[in-house]
Amino acid sequence: MYGQIRIEHNLSCKAKPRLEEDLGFGRHFTDHMFMMDFEEGKGWHDPRIIPYGPISHDPSAMVFHYGQAVFEGLKAFRTEKDEIVLFRPDQNAQRLNRSSDRLQMPQMDENFVVDAIQTLVRVDAEWVPRKKESSLYIRPFVIATEAGLGVRASSRYSFVIIMSPVDSYYEEGLQPVNLLVESHYARAVQGGTGNAKTAGNYAATLKAQALAKEHNCAQVLWLDAIEKIYIEEAGSMNVFFKINGEVVTPSLSGSILDGITRKSIIHLLKEWGISVTERKISIDDLVLAYKNGTLEEAFGTGTAAVVSPIGSLLWNGTPMVINQGNIGDLVRRLYDTITGIQYGRIEDSYGWTISC
């Protein structure tokens, strides 16, 4: 389709982090990366794995000026049987294409994207950590590379995959986080790019995130951009609330990212017979549930943390402490189930993992 993946092995491999070393997130990078180019009239071509290193682009490359950049995030896990698996990479490939389509960027064959990821992981398999609860974070991205100024879609692109060994999101196990309910800044708007995984969405969150830290909060709970009433996301995660036994999550209105962990959790909840509803939920609904004692649990979901329990919400200067700041039983069950599947501690009866 795009040609056979050419592999150029790195002859100057780096020393790998020691098992006891603090890996952090995105601080170390593997010896190789994947690249493929697109040119209008020629299509995607020259898929290759090459030594990890700087990428040279013209200062007028259109990504720097008009923001055509989309990316994905997924992980490779070393199971207890010493097998290396990916968690639902087909979903990442599908979402990469949806994001590209929204930014008028070329599509890719989704099976090839998964194959490229698998091939790169096999080349750098020794970088998949053996440290408990650690993993290899995988970052595929597409950027516009045509040199030239003028607001239009680029005619050239690069598809790149880089990888980084990372620790568990929680150094000391699951920890509830505090969120600032953001009533001024907006992350995204319906009709915008909120449902695409594009770089500009994340740049738009940084100001509010800094304000949250000034209030001793880990992240922001975003409200909708128009009415400033309806819950959207928690930081860069999807968000769920357990209210009077029912789990509620904001419906995908066009400004919310269709999270893969979100999708997996909804599937699990339905299988477990727990009522789960995708609908609009307002901050007033949450305040009312908090006051009448029916707001039982709240959590964010995403690739990095899997499930992140929310300990409190700071709204209009008043903290709302959820479940006495403790981790709820449902959060614990969801976290243990998904990570159990990822690390091979629980049988994957859903076909969510594939081997590398």
Image: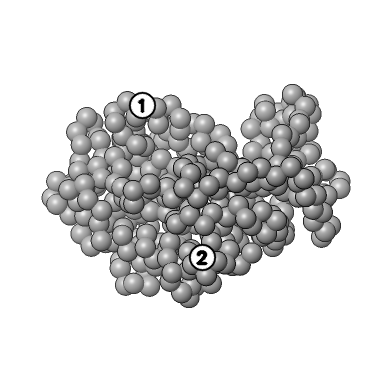
The spot of residue 159 in percent (x, y) is: 71, 45
**Does residue 62 lie above or below 102 as drawn?**
above
337 vs 185, nearest the viewer: 337
Q: Which type of secondary structure does the marked residue at label 1 adopt? A: helix
Task: Give me the residue at 72% from left, 54% from top.
Answer: 108
285 left or right, relative to 46: left
Residue designated by label 1? 211
Q: Is residue 342 above or below residue 312?
A: below
Camera sees residue 169: yes
- Residue placed most toward the observer, 335 or 344: 344
Q: Amino acid at mark 2?
A: Thr
Q: Nearer the viewer, mark 1 or mark 2?
A: 2
Position of residue 334 relative to residue 51, above or below, is below
What is the quadrant of residue 216 in the picture? Answer: top left
Horizontal relation, residue 155 to residue 320: left or right = right
The N terminus - image quarter: bottom right
